[in-house]
Image: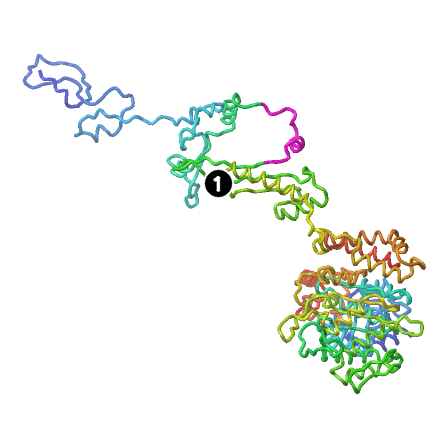
Amino acid sequence: MAAHTSRAFLSLGRINVPGLGLHKSVSRVTYSTGLSTDSSKATTGSPQKGGKKVLSKKYKREPGDPRTELMPVDQDWTAVYPVATPFIPDAIPLPVRMGCPVKGGAPPEKKGNLELIKIPNFLHLTPAAIKKHCEALKPFCTEWPSALDTDAKCDEHFPIKVETKSYVSAGPSIRNPAARIVHLSVKLSSLNLNDQARKKMLKLVGDRYCKDTDILTITADRCPLKQQNYDYAMYLLTVLYHESWKIEAWEAEKTVADMEEYSWEGSLSQENILDVLVRMKEAGEGEGEEVREQLLGRREVQEYKDSVTRLKNEGENESTMLQYKEAVKKVLKL
Amino acid sequence: MFSIISLLYFYSFYPSLLFALHSPLCCWVTHVRSLHTSGGSQQQEAVAAESEPEPLSIFRTQENDPACQSEKHFGQYYTLPSAHVRTVFPHGLPMRYKQQVKTFNEACMMVRPPALEVISSLKKTDNSKPAVRYLFYGLKGSGKTMTLCHTIHFCYTQGWLVLHVPDAHLWVKNCKELLPSSFNSSRYDQPLQATEWLRNFRITNEPFLSKIKTKQRYVWTKRESTEEGSTLGELVDQGITRVKTSSDVVGAVMKELRLQSGQPESDFRLAVAVDGVNALWGRSTIRKMNNTAVDPEELTLVYNLRKLMKNDWTGGAIITTLAQTGAVYTSKYSYLPKELLGEKGFDSMDPFIPVSVPNYSEKEFESCYLYYMDRHWLQYPHSRTEDGKKELIFLSNRNPSMLERICGFH
């Protein structure tokens, strides 16, 4: 009896094999399939289709759930992205979309999105990760001095602030020429300068001084190395300080046009007003110095002096003009 | 009954006033309607007629004498008599205002606070004190020249001698003839400008020309001279006829007036009015033969005027205006005294009284709007509506000259 098992057929009832004789009536139900019987999921379509093919052992593994489905909300993210890694859509539980939106639709989703992979991401530098870095660095650090707990105290003890930048990048060379620039800033009020020295310093320094914050900023970038630039900036500061204290012979020739701000004493305005008042015979009869002194001591003249100084120093606007007008009216007794 | 007759008499001269009147003014409309039936846009108001004649409208005042005007006339227009316009302002009024006077057939000026402030100070001037300097400043087109003209009109009506320089900028630019001065070789004369000024000065101050006598002898050339004791009129005529010496004549006139005013024996008061005083200390566009710029100080006219600007003389006042229009080498947007006068100018004028001339206030704008409506300057019906008025306010920002220009198109 040849068992014909290569064919898949269904037969129910008696098998009447010709030539076997009648006594061989076997009543058995045979249900045989030629293909695999192990999978619970019956692959549809294949009994019909793959009729002629050889049974292949290769099977395709079903892709499972993306890892994001299995991530708890309070997981340790630093373990997911411990180092800088490209964007992995199935490891990042965020519904990010990037790219040009389809017309009437949204930008493409993250799955299979090359744009998200191309750009750098900082998922390895979350605050939790930074905290871990700080904790790791702490054994190598020293304590912040406890006496310097406010900004004011820092300014008082360390008035000079030096600012530099360093650059890290991956490339053929680790050097960056922009790293040599050094900014040195110091408040002029912390330097010991008298009036003349301060004015000279301001003239020497020019644009490097900011009037609103009273900070002098020296930027040094002419040397190739940062340390050289720092030394140069400190040298400049020292030289400026010492030079501004020196008084040269030609500084005595300073004219009214060189003055930084207007001072009323000895100005034309003073001459004019005294002239007018003398002619108006306000001081009574008298000559020379005592008359001038007496006139200068008058309250209206002092107010006039204040208004003119304010007008010249602050520039003119409605309020200064009004003050000047009132002062002139009072002085001329109108 | 008497009131109706007086009103009728008035209306025979100003028939245009019948039309385009606003309801607040219409107390006396009932008189008119009984006699003139073509009322047009007037509204029927059942207001009882007042017994004495009312001011005709809220934007006009009958007080035509600047000395009697006060705060209650603020914003109202007063009429300058045409005789005064011819004598006092042969050269002083702004060009557009002159055209407006010709169009409307009357010269009406608005009474504004800056002018009255200076006028009240002028009333109190003491003849023995040095001359006080007033300076009108303000944005472009805000009415500085008109305010100056108002004060000049006051001075004229009070009998002062008015020395009016209409625009000092004309003396530092566009000079067709520049002669080296015969008196001082480092200075330059401008005969044309000087003669024109002398002519206008003569028109304004006719009565004084025969009264004031010179105190010094002036020698013009080998053969011509003006003796001591001759009248100012002769001096002025000398300058007008002999054009070459006219700049020096101007200088002589200024000197005489400066020395004589405030003296006990002279009975006149001098009002020096200069428009565009910042030209005296600015730059000039005139070039010398070798193409270097002429400093204003080197011009005889400017030099003498600067001497007048100093307050070392008594018995009068100096009223000046800043002007950016027509100024050379100044920014279009500058209007404050120190910017336009410069350091030198400010120090020379110091101490002076700066008087700000702002744009129209709400009340003044209303007044101007009603005046233009009354004169039929606002033609389109849209400008009679509230929206039209708001449009005018928006477009002009209540700037007087802008408003005048825009109303010409509305």
Q: Is residue B252 above or below residue B330?
A: below
Q: Is residue B167 visible?
A: yes
Percent coordinates x, y for residue B106 in the rendering: 78, 75
Please, which residue is most extreme toward the top here? Answer: A23
Q: Please name the residue shown 7% across and 19% down the image.
A: A18
Q: Is residue A269 above or below residue B191?
A: above
Residue in front for this viewpoint, A250 or B148:
A250
Q: Is residue B24 visible?
A: no
Magenta segment includes A11: no
Q: Is residue A90 above or below residue B346?
A: above
- Chain letter, disc 1 residue: A
Q: Is residue B325 above or below residue A222?
A: below
Give the residue number, with chain letter if any, for mark 1.
A224
Q: Quadrant of residue A24?
A: top left
What amino acid is found at the position of numbered circle 1 in the picture?
Pro
Q: Quadrant of residue B200?
A: bottom right
Q: Quadrant of residue B189?
A: bottom right
Q: Please name the residue shown 84% across and 59% down the image.
A: A273
Q: Secondary structure at mark 1?
A: loop
Percent coordinates x, y for residue A167 in the rendering: 47, 36
Magenta range:
A143-161
Percent coordinates x, y for residue B166 in the rendering: 75, 73
Judge the density around disc 1: few (<14), some (14-19), many (≥20) Cα neighbours within 10 Å. Answer: few
Magenta segment includes A149: yes
